[in-house]
Amino acid sequence: MNLFHTIAVARASLPRLTLAQRVVDKMVRNALVYSTETGESLVGFAVKGLQRAEPDLYVIETIAPDESAIRRGAYFEQGDDLQGDIFAWWYNNWELYRRWRKSARKPDGLDKALEDKLDVPLVHLGDWHKHPGTLIEPSWGDTDTARGHIADKSNHTPQLLAILATVWDRSEDAAFAATEPPDPNNEHPKPIRVPIDDRNVVRLDCWYISRSTRRFVRLSPTVVPDDMLPKLPTLGWHLVNLDRLRHEMALLSGEGFSVSVDEYDVDHVPPQEVCIFLARPTSAKVLIVVTQADYPDSRPTLRIAPMNAIQGLPEDADLYQSLWERSEPLPKEAEPTWPWNADHTILDLVRDVEARLKEGSAVR
Ligand SMILES: [Zn+2]
């Protein structure tokens, strides 16, 4: 058997990897500041073609490591998994977008054929991380972790992408390149090399492992302009503006409210809204503050729901869903009339609304 032919066939069956330019830019930027073994998770699509053994991979976003777990406080049931919360936001909003796109026949800037091809759920594709010195290959630890991941039968994505970032001295990079075997027909996978300044080059090596390769193999990435791939919606303010979230929650708790934050698709247009449920221990009503992802730029709206909406519900029922379904807009006379700006807080709105609500219909 012709050995070269065998290798070529194996190559042809590997995933085609496409990276959005913004993802490359972010990896390069962060490789210069992150410490070794620190990285980000890679988010995008794995599209299985009919004739292909391995999926085509598209990386469109990264999620930074979770350094802020402690800052989150006790207001989220998920607790300390900010990375997971960010992925969930994007996943849910992408699903919403897919449904919305079909119903609204929304024309998009993207190529129609590509958009149809990428009409699949968002997945975690793997991660990128920084390696020390000139270690461009996965470490023993990387391989061990990856094998565990692909062997795990509960994993719906039985493959893993690992992009390794290394920062090189220019002369080192040139010396290394000179030792690589000649490749006149451009058949060998190439890393991405990004010159930074007179001294440094950041190198990104893309590796892939699946149940059929069973070991890390190199991929040749294609980098495309951002507008050639879908862009995920803005993250909700409660996932990025954690200081503001903590401040707002402290004010509301200080006022005697029990507070719960949840994500809802209120207006059937992505992205979802961030809803804050407020109740006093003795109140017969629950206030629902609906904020947009860009809060505090835009003014929240308020709704009101009867507390008895959650009476007699089965144990596994979603209390907030039930409250939401029974909620109504504020009566006209309770709507705040003053102009909103970002210096105001949710508590300012709530105090005003409570004062305007007539005795008996108020939440107090
Ligand atoms: Zn590693």
Image (tube, rainbow, N blue to C red):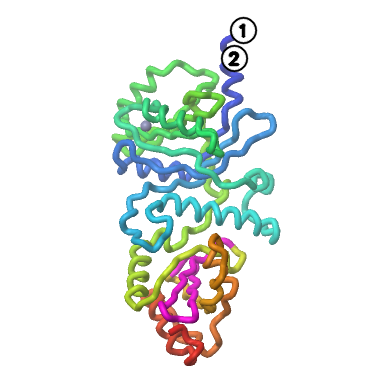
Looking at the image, the residue that sits furthest to the bottom is 359
Q: Kindly check if marks 1 and 2 are in contact, taking CB atoms under 8 A apart as contact.
A: yes
- Between 293 and 263, the one nearer to me in the picture: 263
- Ligand 1 within 8 Å, label 2 CB: no
Q: In the rendered view of the protein, which quadrant contains the N terminus? A: top right
Which span is picked out in magenta? 270-295
Give residue 18's position: percent from left, percent from top: 54, 38
Q: Which residue is mark 1?
A: 1
Give the side of residue 177 with respect to residue 264, left or right.
left
What amino acid is at disc 2?
Thr
Q: Which residue is mark 2?
A: 6
Q: Based on the picture, tell me whether residue 279 belongs to the magenta stretch.
A: yes
Badge 1, how many Cα within 10 Å: few under 14, some, many 20+? Answer: few
Q: Based on the picture, tell me whether residue 356 belongs to the magenta stretch.
A: no
Q: Is residue 3 above or below residue 90?
A: above
Element type at mark 2: helix
Q: Where on the image, by quarter, is ligand 1?
A: top left
What amino acid is at disc 1?
Met
Badge 2, how many Cα within 10 Å: few under 14, some, many 20+? Answer: few
Q: Is residue 254 above or below residue 116?
A: below
Give residue 357's position: percent from left, percent from top: 48, 88
Give residue 263's position: percent from left, percent from top: 51, 63
- Between 41 and 222, the one nearer to me in the picture: 41
Could you tell me if residue 271 is visible in this image?
no
